[in-house]
Image (spheres, rainbow, N blue to C red):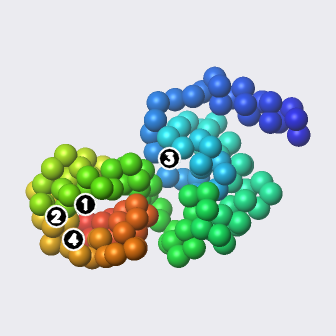
Amino acid sequence: MKKLLAAAAVAVALTAAPARAADNVGCGMGSVLLRGQSGIVLNLLATFLNNISGNQTFGITTGTSGCTQNGRIAGGTGKLFAFMENNLDQFAIDASRGHGETIDAVASIMDMPADKVGSIAKQNFAVLFNGEDADAVSVSLKMSELLKA
């Protein structure tokens, strides 16, 4: 076990990459420790860390480690979530106006015209930001659903 952890540590040190959202490893300790990293080795390491000792199950049960109790299996919304996690306040301001840098960024992430994203965000502002549920996870999922419709 010590050799495996040492190999994983060396792999992390050798393959540390620029920040980029990985949306295929789920939530848990690995996702928290390796947030913003990318690459196959780091994805595998994050998945391994998420699953050891049942910490992913614990995270989902308690709502910790980047997990949510009421979350849905989101598939490809990881990039949007990573962006919203760091820019939610500014996105709320831009969404209320229907334009701005964060609207442009979301449009780029979703590969859509910025004017369409801005229009949808402005028209659905109350749906996106409805009280205590307005966190990066819920806004990302709602915005993704609205843009797919």
Residue where numbered disc 4 is placed: 125
Name which residue type carries label 1: Ala
Marks 4 and 2 in Cβ contact (< 8 Å): yes
Q: Provide the secondary structure element on which disc 1 rests.
A: helix
Q: Nearer the viewer, mark 3 or mark 4?
A: 4
Q: Nearer the viewer, mark 3 or mark 1?
A: 1
Please give the name of the residue rendered at 15% of the width and 50% of the height, measured from the top-left corner. 100
Q: Provide the secondary structure element on which disc 2 rests.
A: helix
Name which residue type carries label 2: Ser
Q: Provide the secondary structure element on which disc 3 rests.
A: loop
Cα distance in 3D space between marks 4 and 1: 8 Å
Marks 4 and 1 in Cβ contact (< 8 Å): no
Q: Residues within 10 Å of mark 4 (few under 14, many from 20)?
A: some
Q: Earlier in the sequence, mark 4 or mark 2?
A: 2
Please give the name of the residue rendered at 65% of the width and 30% of the height, measured from the top-left corner. 12
The quarter of the picture where residue 5 lies is top right
Residue where numbered disc 3 is placed: 22
Residue 28 can be seen, yes or no: yes
Name which residue type carries label 4: Phe
Residue where numbered disc 1 is placed: 92
The quarter of the picture where residue 40 lies is top right
Q: Position of residue 94 (x, y in %)?
A: 18, 56
Marks 2 and 1 in Cβ contact (< 8 Å): yes
Residue where numbered disc 2 is placed: 96
